[in-house]
Amino acid sequence: MKENMKILEVNRSDKKGIKKEPIGSGKFIEDFGLENDAHAGKWHRQVSLLAIESYHRMEEQGIKDLPIGAFGENLTTEGIELHTLPVGTVLKIGETVQEVTQIGKECHTMCNIGKTVGTCVMPNEGIFTKIIKGGEIKKGDKIEIELP
């Protein structure tokens, strides 16, 4: 695996279906997700992750100036194609341990993100995890991978 896999930003929102705002660091709670985030809860999609490489693909399609968090991800990563990881992969990020529970998601209606941006990469390239061990994650933290 690559050595330069890291967190570019931690993002949070108070409501679902809107872009998340960068917060620099956050407390991730075991079996819950990011403290004070709209998507946190006791289910299998506690944390959402999207790679900056996915943003770059959108830019190549002509969609420019997307702010980090535009697709509603909690963690924006760099150096890893997240959607290629199999379900069950364990990620060690900051003080946390997370398990990949879902790759992509089905969008039944166009959310505010899709309406604003015009399209969304989360359905194909975003991944979701649940928090196995809680703790802090901050901008710049390295990502370690343990494949199942």
Image (tube, rainbow, N blue to C red):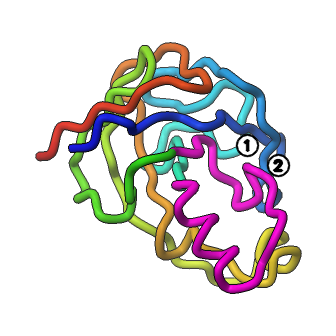
At 48% from the left and 75% from the top, the residue drawn is: 124
Asked whether the residues under the numbered discs 2 and 1 touch, taking CB atoms below 8 Å apart as contact, a structural biologist would say yes
Is 42 positioned to the left or the right of 72 in the image? left
Task: Name above or below for residue 104 compared with residue 101.
Answer: below
Is residue 56 shown in magenta? yes
Task: Name above or below for residue 81 compared with residue 137.
Answer: below
At 15% from the left and 45% from the top, the residue drawn is: 147
* Three-letter residue code for mark 2: Lys
Rendered location of residue 35, percent (x, y): 66, 24
Is residue 13 shown in magenta? no
Quadrant of the image containing the N terminus: top left
Considering every residue shown, the one lying at the far right of the view is 116
Q: Which residue is mark 1?
A: 38
SS at mark 1 in the image: loop
Rendered location of residue 85, percent (x, y): 27, 57
Q: Which mark is residue 94?
A: none
Q: Which residue is mark 2?
A: 15
At 52% from the left and 42% from the top, the residue drawn is: 46
